Each structure stands twice: as C-alpha cells, then as structure tokens.
Amino acid sequence: MFSFFKKKPPAPEPAPAEAAPAPAAAEPPEPAGRGWLRNPFGAKAEAAPEPPPAEVAAEPAARTGWVDRLKQGLRKTGSSITTVFTGTRIDEALYEELEEALLMADTGVKATTVLLDDLRRRVKEARATEPAAVRELLVDAIADLLRPLQKPLVIGEHKPTVVMVAGVNGAGKTTSIGKLTRHLAAHKASVLLAAADTFRAAAREQLAVWADRNYVEIISQQGGDPAAVAFDAVNAGRARGKDVVLVDTAGRLPTQLHLMEELKKIRRTLVKADTAGTGVPHEVLLVIDGNTGQNALMQVKAFDDAIGLTGLIVTKLDGTAKGGVLAAIAQERPVPVYFIGVGEKLEDLETFDAREFAQALLG
C-alpha cells in the first residue's frame, strides 16, 4: 500500500502498569472548536461533525490497478508513439516520426530534443537493431528525465504543516484538496481547511462539503479578505494542535495581474503568521489540468515566479490528456510532481512515479 505522504512516527506509548484498576467511565470532553468561534478578523471556525463510530477508511486501490487506469488515460498518446516502432529498421525516418509523435504529445521542442539525443546515445551503446528495443530505451530515457520530479510530500516535520494550494479555474483545485484531505485523515493526520477562495461563488460551500465528508474543521468567511482567512487558519491550526492546514485560494489566470497580486498577499500574510519561524507556508502547490498541454508549462512558470512553488498536482489525465507536458516541465521548470489524477474517484489520485508514468506514456 502506498502512502500519499511521509509522516514522522509517533512516540511509542508506555506499557500499562500490571493489575491497574480500570478507570471509571467518564463523559468525553467537549472537542475544541465546537460551535461557532469568533476571531479578530470576523471569520468563523466551523466545527467538524462527529464521524460515525463504525466508519472505517477504505483501503486504497492496488498500485497495479492504478497503473492500468493511468495507461488507459494516456492511451491516445501511447498508441501514437508506439506506432513509430512497428517498422523493421532503425533509421532517420524512425527518429523523425518519433520527433513528430513526441511534439504532438506536448513534450515541447526542448524536451523532445533532449530525449532524442539521449535515445540516440542509448541505442548506440546498447547496439540495438530492432525498433522494439528502441521503445524500451525510450522508456528509460523518459523515466530518467522525469525522475527529478519524483518527490514525496512530507508531513510531520512541522506542526501544523501549512500547505497553500493555487490553480486556475477548472483545473480541479478544490476537488484535489478534498481528495488530499480524505487521504491525510485516513492516515490519522488531523486537518484544518481554510476557505481563502472568497471570490468564486459557492467556493466556500464546495470546500465545506469536503470538510463534512472528511469530518474535518474549516475556517471560512463569507466575502471576506482571503489573506485574513489564511492568517486565522494558521493560528487556529496551531492552537488546536492540527497536523496540516490546507489553504484553498481563488482560481485565477496568470494574466490576471490583480488576482496574482492577491495571491502574493496571501503568501506574505502566511509568512507573517509564522511566529515560530518554521518557514510557513511549508508547501506551495499548483494544481494543473493535464489537458491544457503547453499552457500547463506556462502556468507553472508564472505561478512559480509569483509565489515560489514547491510541488504540483496534475489532474485529468484520463482520456484526452497527452501527458508529455511533464517532460517539458522536467526540462524547463522542474517543480516536483507530488500527485497525479486520472478521474473523479478518491482512488484516482496517487503519488507520482517517474517510471510508471514513462511506461504509461508509451502504452
């Protein structure tokens, strides 16, 4: 079973004393934060509902099943590239067809050039004579190119770990936050959500639905200042001993300069909330839609320049996405890819593995 994150193990509990009398039954204490709490900014802290006592977190799907779904999602790209290797000769015509197929898969000119140069070297060193062997060598080349993007999300070095999440409208940002919340909670990490997307209609309500489903608390404010909500969430997370604070921000295009400035303001405010000097926000994630091709690379560059990205979540690699843009990102702006998604189900979001992705990309 693969975890979505790494978490420091808790300290071992001391062994109970022998023949210790059983404690008398007592009423459970009222959880911190129940009801509606006021803060200096006027935001409300919405308490998490009590989870059903019999509910048990479902086991994630087997990794092999996940890889199969990823291959199915990238089947169009895989079929177009593998067609190149159906011939009988390794010649310049093969490399030219492969170059065209990689460009059509959104790998970009720079990454395609690097991959083909590396592939020619590998073919020469391996003394390959069959096109089918070239395909396997290309898998190795793509995996090596993508390997710098393979990095786990670490939870537990700081308490709370503050994660700021950005992305353009429609990329699946809020849904990805909900899925990540579910998996964090399933691994016994306490999570606090911050509804700092106060621009989009119903954004607060959408995040509140995920909070209810996952039995976690949410800090929100109707039509308020996003930076104030984020600031209050960090303080609340620290006061309540939360493991993770996930800050949802408003979706915006990199060309919307006034909204990008608001995003910078949220980040500066989070830094001010870091009274302990732990480096808040500890993670700044960008959610990108795998269907947007080279536009995804442009988004990574723009958001990285504005707020300093630490990781990516790539969504919607399920049918029309070509997937090659990750090679372009690895070549031009190697921001780690923490998670990739191939659908709407909870199990359709998984950690990124360079070799798995390379194999899926080539069918």
Image (cartoon, helix red, strand yellow):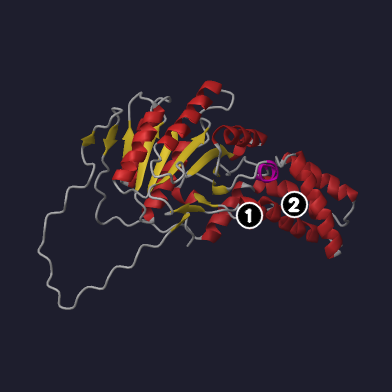
Describe residue 210's horizontal placement relative to residue 145 as left or right.
Answer: left
Estimate the x, y position of residue 95 in percent, counting from the top left: 84, 48
Q: Nearer the viewer, mark 2 or mark 1?
A: 1
Mark seen at residue 277: none
Choose between 106 and 296: the one closer to the eye.
296
Q: How busy is the neighbourhood of tag 2: few (under 14 within 10 Å), some, or many (20 plus)?
A: some
Residue 270 drawn at (x, y percent): 43, 36
Amino acid on which the number 2 mark rests in the picture: Thr
SS at circle 1:
helix
Which of the 4 image quadrants contains residue 274?
top left
178 shown above or below 144:
above
Q: Does dot 2 land on a helix, a strand or a loop?
A: helix
Residue 242: horizontal and vertical position, in percent? Answer: 33, 48
Tell me where the magenta segment starts and ends, as one range: 325-332
> On the image, numbered disc 2 is attached to which residue?
82
Residue under label 1: 354
